[in-house]
Image (cartoon, grey):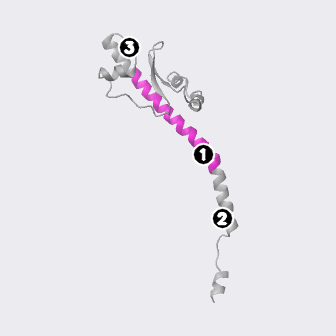
Amino acid sequence: MFKKSLKNEKGFTLIELIIVIAIIAIISAILAPSFARMTARSRLKADISSARELTREAALYNADKGRYPSSVNDLVNDKYIDSAPNPQTSGAQFIWDGTNNRFKVDVSGNSDVQALISTLSPDEQNFAQ
């Protein structure tokens, strides 16, 4: 009686399960770099947004003081912002670009992120270096 009930059972064989697991592993290996790129791009865009806000605060600083700040610390010391923002991108920092009177995200130490800058809009590229 026990043998008879096992023969009537339906299910997957070990080979079928191994094939499905292999297909899932291949798809994951293909998609993982894309997710990493999307995450890095999102972090860079968040930093660019912070640089834009710092630039707005620098314009207010200029309107009050008659000169632009030389760094984020000037904005913090004069109470234009509560604290210096921490860059989301690894190795990035906010620097003052006196030529264009704006803050930029400096990612010169990270070649992977530098390659992402070319995928940004022209306006966003103005805030990244």
Q: Residue at x 40, y 16 (%)?
A: 70
Q: Counting other residues with Cα less than 10 Å from the Cα at mark 2, is it few (<14), some (14-19), or many (20 or more)?
A: few
Mark 1 or mark 3: name the one nearer the start of the chain. 1
Mark 2 or mark 1: name the one nearer the start of the chain. 2
Q: Counting other residues with Cα less than 10 Å from the Cα at mark 3, is it few (<14), some (14-19), or many (20 or more)?
A: many
Element under disc 2: helix
- Any mark on residue 20, and which? none
Mark 2 belongs to which amino acid?
Answer: Leu
Q: Residue at x 33, y 25 (%)?
A: 81
Residue 128 position, x and y percent, is: 51, 24
Residue 56 position, x and y percent, is: 39, 21
Mark 2 or mark 3: name the one nearer the start of the chain. 2
Mark 1 belongs to which amino acid?
Answer: Ala
Verify whether residue 51 appears in magenta.
Answer: yes
| In this view, 127 is above or below 113 | above
Q: Main secondary structure of the magenta part?
A: helix
Residue nearest the viewer, comparing 77 with 121: 77
Query: In the image, which residues are magenta?
Result: 28-55
In the picture, the quarter occupied by the N terminus is bottom right
Q: Counting other residues with Cα less than 10 Å from the Cα at mark 1, is it few (<14), some (14-19), or many (20 or more)?
A: few
Rounded to the nearest angstrom, the CA distance separating label 1 from label 3 is 43 Å
Rounded to the nearest angstrom, the CA distance separating label 2 from label 3 is 65 Å
Element under disc 1: helix
| In this view, 88 is above or below 32 | above
- Any mark on residue 32, and which? 1
- Mark 2, residue position: 17
Q: Tell how many labels.
A: 3
- Mark 3, residue position: 68
